[in-house]
Image (cartoon, grey):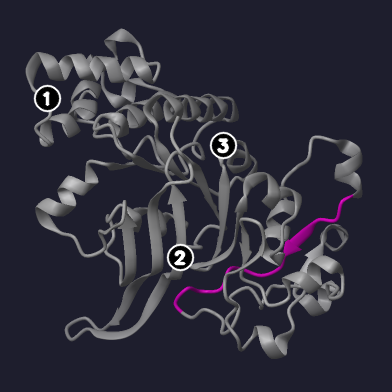
Amino acid sequence: MTDKGEELVRIENLKVYFPIKSGMVFERHIGDVKAVDDVSFSIHRGETLGLVGESGCGKTTLGRTILRLYDPTEGHIFFEGRDIAGLSGKELRATRRRMQMVFQDPYASLNPRQNVGNIVGEPLYVHGIARGAELDKRVQHLLDVVGLPQNAGNRYPHEFSGGQRQRIGLARSLALNPDLIVADEPVSALDVSIQAQIINLLEDLQEEFNLTLLFVAHDLAVVRHISDRIVVMYLGKIMEIAPAAQLYDQPLHPYTRSLLSAVPIPDPAVERSRERIFLRGDLPSPANPPSGCRFHTRCPFAQIERCSDEVPELRPLRNDQVVACHYAEEIESGRIQARPPEEAGVMTEADSIK
């Protein structure tokens, strides 16, 4: 078995900004979309790290930047101790063999003009690993591994269902025997019953191929099932990192609490009695994020004089649990209470019914 204590990937102070320009002829740089803003964390070999947050929080951008599909604006991406943030050309291409991606949309991520055999075998051909009969043999093995029929290689993507197309994407990602796979919401476009099949397949493949997974999603129930640890993002910043069970049982950040309050619990008595928090208002623009704590404009516990001015550091509070909140201890102990919904910028379930 793989040692999950060994560090495979380390991200340090990573920033990914997209420039905003004005003018048709003489373009002027008038600002930046701060998709990822000063993020640091690590991924251990053999683990599944869940990455969750609202749409637009930067989680997909972060996953693609780790694979160098996007160039970082600042910061470092260490893969087995080597900084790959500045690699290009042959060095980057060689490194990419060991890092692959499963895309969100199984309908858009496969070339409709190629049959499945060519789609799955293309990485092997491009990197000069296999040709001819050996290529066909390896493609057939990969299709068998992900549970596709014998004749799948001769068919085209439009002949398959959404779940089968995602299996094709998985087979393609496994072709080069990578160490790291970034799965970008791989089940969000699928039916619930098919989601369970793909999640179970991912777990089986992880054990068989000794994979390390970065699982990007917004469905907290799915993330809890598959992840060893979870990173919670909000507006380009990390709010909390913790082991999966610990995060769900004892969340520390107010944003994590609000996300978990929306996850259904299969116990009617518990579901009726628990307090649910609905965040009022939209996610602020990453082009003009709030000062201080990014979450303070929607946080029911915010102390405006500090939270609006001072950026909270990501600091340890429990074993393996870190949080970016000035008042996490006070909120957990009850010394700071949530303000009324009309003052705090949030609404309770009762308010939503009214």
* Rendering coords of residue 83 (x, y %): 27, 61
* Rendering coords of residue 195 (x, y %): 54, 30
Name the amino acid, label 1: Ala
User: Reading the chain from its start, which is encountered first: label 1 or label 2?
Assistant: 2
User: Where is mark 3, residue-wise?
Assistant: 226
User: Reading the chain from its start, which is encountered first: label 3 or label 2?
Assistant: 2
User: Where is mark 1, residue-wise?
Assistant: 130
Q: Are marks 1 and 2 in contact (CB under 8 Å)?
A: no
Name the amino acid, label 2: Ser
The part of the chain drawn in magenta is 274-287
Q: Residue at x 19, y 14 (%)?
A: 137
* Rendering coords of residue 222 (x, y %): 60, 39
User: Where is mark 2, residue-wise?
Assistant: 40
User: Reading the chain from its start, which is encountered first: label 1 or label 3?
Assistant: 1
Name the secondary structure under disc 2. strand
Q: Nearer the observer, disc 3 or disc 2?
A: 2
Name the amino acid, label 3: Ile
Q: Is 319 on the left or on the right of 342, as rendered? A: left
Mark 1 and mark 3: Cα distance apart in space:
33 Å
Q: Nearer the observer, disc 1 or disc 2?
A: 2
